[in-house]
Amino acid sequence: MLAPVQDRGSARRTKSNARSVSMGVSTGAALILATVAGSAQAAIAPAPAPAAEAPSEAAATPAPANDVSADTEASPADAGETTSAPPEEDSAEADAPSDDATDDESEETETSEPVEEAEAPRPPRIDGVYLGGMAFGGIGLMRLNDIPTSGPFTAFGGTATIGQMVFPWLGLGLTAGGAGGVRSESGARQTLGQGQLGFEFKFVPLPKRIPLSLRASFGFGGGAVRQEGVAARSGFGGPQFGAAVRYEFFPWAKRFRPFKGGGFGLGPELGWTGFTPAAAGRPMSNIVYLALSTTFYFGD
């Protein structure tokens, strides 16, 4: 009889233990399900609305489209402020000129303005080897030993010159020329004849700007005066000097020699030539003249 009683007691204990285990399992499962359900609700729940104190930040920095929609659902006031900012940016962009329009305007300005080409440097005209001559007219003053000459002579003459510009401002050459003159003394006709040979120095102060030259010469020569009705003649001679200033025009240089120096020049010359007396009271001759000079410069 004891064995069956013991078997029933062990069976009861086994059943109670099984119930305890099943209750613990069911309690744990319920806790796990509650935890999972709470995390799922937290993930599904919408994000909290932004604080009412930060509307300026939302207006200054536009949020992405997804965030804007979320904020709109959360706070209609913030959504209104957020949507009002983009039109201002659009109006500013509309007022500002586009880059393409600016580029077109700059291109039109550049094309409308004429492009000034750099001018080539003008070549010097008084340049190189030169050949020249002049014809002049003026007055001559003479002093002679045997024939009285109380008045001036009407003088005329000419010279020929060959030389070279050794520097842009200096030329050296040889010159030869002669002069004649006439006057009347007490109803008697007097005639003058003279000639000279000398060296010439030509100075050009501004060779790149003004074709103006200063000439100085020295040499030797002589002359004589004859009077109508007098067989003898009275003369003079010795060292000869001269000085002049000349301005030249080059009318055909730009056409025929636009990029080469030299050319054909012509212009007025005002000067003096004279034979100085060898001693006090000795014969002398002085001619002041205005001439037309012509010179051809071959250039370099």
Image (cartoon, grey):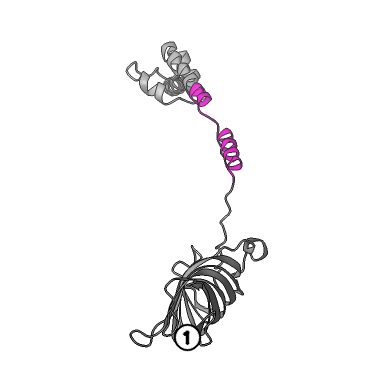
Q: Residue at x 51, y 71 (%)?
A: 187
Quarter containing the N terminus: top left
Q: Is residue 4 visible?
A: no
* Residues rendered magenta in the picture: 89-114
Q: How many marks?
A: 1
Q: Residue at x 59, y 45 (%)?
A: 114
**Percent position (x, y) of residue 38?**
43, 20
Front residue of 228 and 59: 228
Location of residue 231 with respect to 271 vertically, above or below: below
Q: Secondary structure at mark 1?
A: strand
Q: Which residue is denoted by mark 1 in the rendering?
A: 234
Q: Quadrant location of residue 71?
A: top left
**Percent position (x, y) of residue 284?**
42, 81
Please give left or right for residue 226 compared with residue 143 in the image.
Answer: right
Which residue is outermost to the right? Answer: 256
Front residue of 163 and 285: 285
Location of residue 123 with respect to 196 vertically, above or below: above
Q: Amino acid at mark 1?
A: Ser
Location of residue 210 with respect to 81 vertically, above or below: below
